[in-house]
Amino acid sequence: SMSNVTLRIARVSDVHELLALYVPYVEETAISFETEVPSLEEFTQRMIKRLPQYPYIVAQRGGELLGYAYLSPFVGRAAYLWAAETTIYLRRDCRKMGIGKMLYTALESLARAQGIINLEACIGWTDEPDEHLTNNSAEYHAHLGYRMVGRFYKCGYKFGTWYDMVWMEKLISEHPETPQDIIPFSELSAETLKKAGLEA
């Protein structure tokens, strides 16, 4: 059940388990447009690069990791600082349990505390669902309050199939005339982390 699922900040010691969780998405689905599984080193570097500026969090139960989610820079130019890209992956036997919503709710709370306003999600899309891709992810994001803002046609090729990609967006606070400086994730208070549902 969900009652014993907890959230915490990801650690480098999690990478073996998180990479194992991600592998089937690369090898068996078009949910990730990566076609080769990243090395452990590369996967570790990705985590180290996100932290300490952005949240990278995991869901766990009884010492097992069930999913992870993180924010990344959106595009990477300075004017985009108030927008961040979201990423989430769940262990495939742990979908439809509310863990995704739990991770995303925490990410939103942390992003808001940082001063981030726009959350952007890049999602594979197809008009003809197959064994590699359905539109579950887009439907899931819509359910969480994301709206469709753009669609790119047949821009991804994987498993001998052309797939579309969509961008979905959620605005999590108002846009002030002059935005505050973004607070790095590592500088958020313990109280803020706790409020977002993270365990120490």
Image: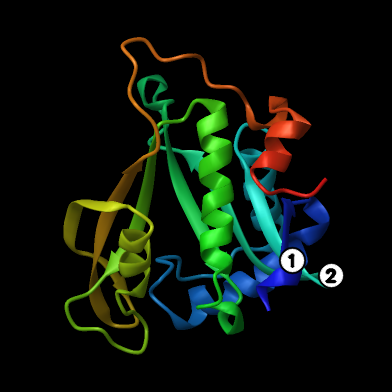
Q: Taking 111 as reference, is 60 above or below it?
A: below
Q: Is mark 1 in CB contact (under 8 Å) with mark 2?
A: yes
Q: Amino acid at mark 1?
A: Gln
Q: Is residue 33 left or right of residue 125?
A: right
Front residue of this view, candidates 91 and 104: 104
Q: Taking 169 as reference, is 118 above or below it?
A: above
Residue at the spot of label 1: 60
Disc marking residue 82: none
When asked about the image quadrant of residue 138, the answer is bottom left
Does residue 193 show up?
A: yes
Q: Amino acid at mark 2?
A: Gly
Q: Report helix, strand or loop for mark 1.
A: strand
In space, the residues marked 1 and 2 are separated at their CA atoms by 6 Å
When asked about the image quadrant of residue 174, the answer is top left
Q: Report helix, strand or loop for mark 2.
A: loop
Residue at the spot of label 2: 63
Residue 186, given in percent of the width and then of the height, sits at 71, 30
For image coordinates 57% across by 70% down, the residue present is 90
Q: Is residue 86 left or right of residue 65?
A: left
Does residue 65 show up?
A: no
For image coordinates 59% across by 22% down, the residue present is 183
- Point out the residue furthest to the top here: 178
Residue 88, given in percent of the width and then of the height, sits at 52, 60
**Badge 2: residue crowd in 10 Å (few <14, some 14–19, many ≥20):** few
The quadrant of the image that shows the C terminus is top right
Residue 98, given in percent of the width and then of the height, sits at 54, 70
**Badge 1: residue crowd in 10 Å (few <14, some 14–19, many ≥20):** some
Front residue of this view, candidates 3 and 32: 3
Residue 105, given in percent of the width and then of the height, sits at 53, 51
